[in-house]
Image: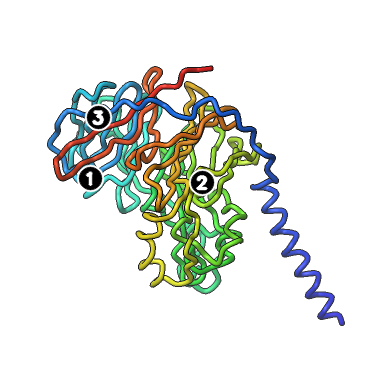
Amino acid sequence: MIKIISTLICIFIIYGCINHDQKKYFQKSKKTEKIIAYSKVDLDTIYLDSISSSFVGFSTIVSDSIFFIDEMFCSIYTFNKYGKYAANHLGQGKGPKEIPTGRIEAYTPLNNNKHLFLGPSYDLYTFNKNWKRIKNNRIDWKKKNNRKEMLKNPKPYMRGLYAPAYYKLIIRENNGYMYFPINSQHPTFNYVNSKDYYKEARILAKMNTKTGEIVKLMGRYSPLFQNYNYIPQFSLPNYDIASNGDFYVSFEPDSLIYLYNNNYEIKEVFGRKGHNMNTSYKEITSIKSFKANYKNERKTKGFYNWLEYNDQHGILFRNYRKGNPTKTNGLQIYKKGTLIGDIDIPTDFQKIIGSIGPYFYSNIVIDETHEKMKIYRFKLNQK
């Protein structure tokens, strides 16, 4: 009898902890107001000047310049708002204006016009406004547990379990700290076949940009993941940080958007489903199945793939993919938690990367075959 009572007490304590954890990071959402002011926008297509590039990379906007970060050449090509070539910075090498790594994995601008790059081996490179390298360091996880201990008895708070989620590495800087998504590939605590992972795993790391030290592991997965028997192909978060330190967070299969303050305390939950999304996700329970189905699932199914908060205009954009058989993707526009637009966009328009003046810009679209690059832009007539 005593054993039964003890067991019930333990279950109650565990259940209570889980509920407390859920309440801490997620609260019940209210129905998001929908006032559609924009059902379509007029897209301008701008072709960028020709460059000598590997055409493998990603894009962003810094100040009034469009950046194309060439991952393979470790070069940064800059263009003005009309797509006219302006300059080429850095390159691969050991010189003061080069990056001594084989690849650029991620980039974020810092205060005082500085630039921070992340390489493939936790390596970090900081450049000043004149593109001179002023610091080399590495991510320091400050591990407190040895490998044997982590393998035998993994705990979700152990920093050594995690690594940057390199295949969707969104890095953001705010107030001297860099944030990036993380995941674990531990044999029994991982995003492919561990139910506890989606209850307890952390999703973001907070790093001191001066020292490279990881000072905090943050967040949890959306409760929606508990509805599935594993969908690791859509396991990574989307997030952005406002200038006041607020976090906007969403998850690829979840229609909700979670707003946290700068201490990562929940403030608000909002969001509405995108149009005509194919969400018949294949449930996956093995590494073999994950590898076999990952690309096809992301190609054929609908999911929310990007968040971008624009401080200048006070607007949150969320891009989503509809999946087969539709021939367009979607772009949602939120203002103070209200959905004010949900528009169809071309399938190669994958995300908003920023704004210059009244115009909002898409990612750079690369045509490797013809060595051409283009970008979409549009503006919203404020109503």
Whether residue 27 sits left or right of residue 293 in the image: it is right
Q: Which residue is mark 3?
A: 131
Cα–Cα gap, marks 3 and 1: 21 Å
Circles 1 and 2, Cβ within 8 Å, touching? The answer is: no
**Amino acid type shown at disc 2:** Val
Question: Could you tell which of marks 3 and 1 lies nearer the N-terminus?
Answer: 1
Q: Quadrant of residue 224?
A: bottom right
**Amino acid type shown at disc 3:** Trp
Q: Which residue is mark 1?
A: 56
Q: Quadrant of residue 201?
A: bottom right
In-front residue for pair 260/316: 316
In the orientation shown, which residue stands out farthest toward the right? 1
Mark 3 closeness class: few <14, some 14–19, many ≥20 residues within 10 Å: some
Question: Could you tell which of marks 3 and 2 lies nearer the N-terminus?
Answer: 3
Of tags 3 and 1, which is closer to the observer?
Answer: 1
Residue 188 percent across, percent down from the top left: 51, 71
Mark 1 closeness class: few <14, some 14–19, many ≥20 residues within 10 Å: few
Q: Which residue is mark 2?
A: 215
Cα–Cα gap, marks 1 and 2: 32 Å
Of tags 3 and 2, which is closer to the observer?
Answer: 3
> Secondary structure beneath disc 2?
strand
Residue 223 percent across, percent down from the top left: 62, 55
Circles 3 and 2, Cβ within 8 Å, touching? The answer is: no
Residue 173 appearing in the image: no
Above or below 99: residue 232 = below
Query: Which residue is at 24% across, 48% downward?
Result: 103
Above or below 33: residue 141 = below
**Amino acid type shown at disc 1:** Val
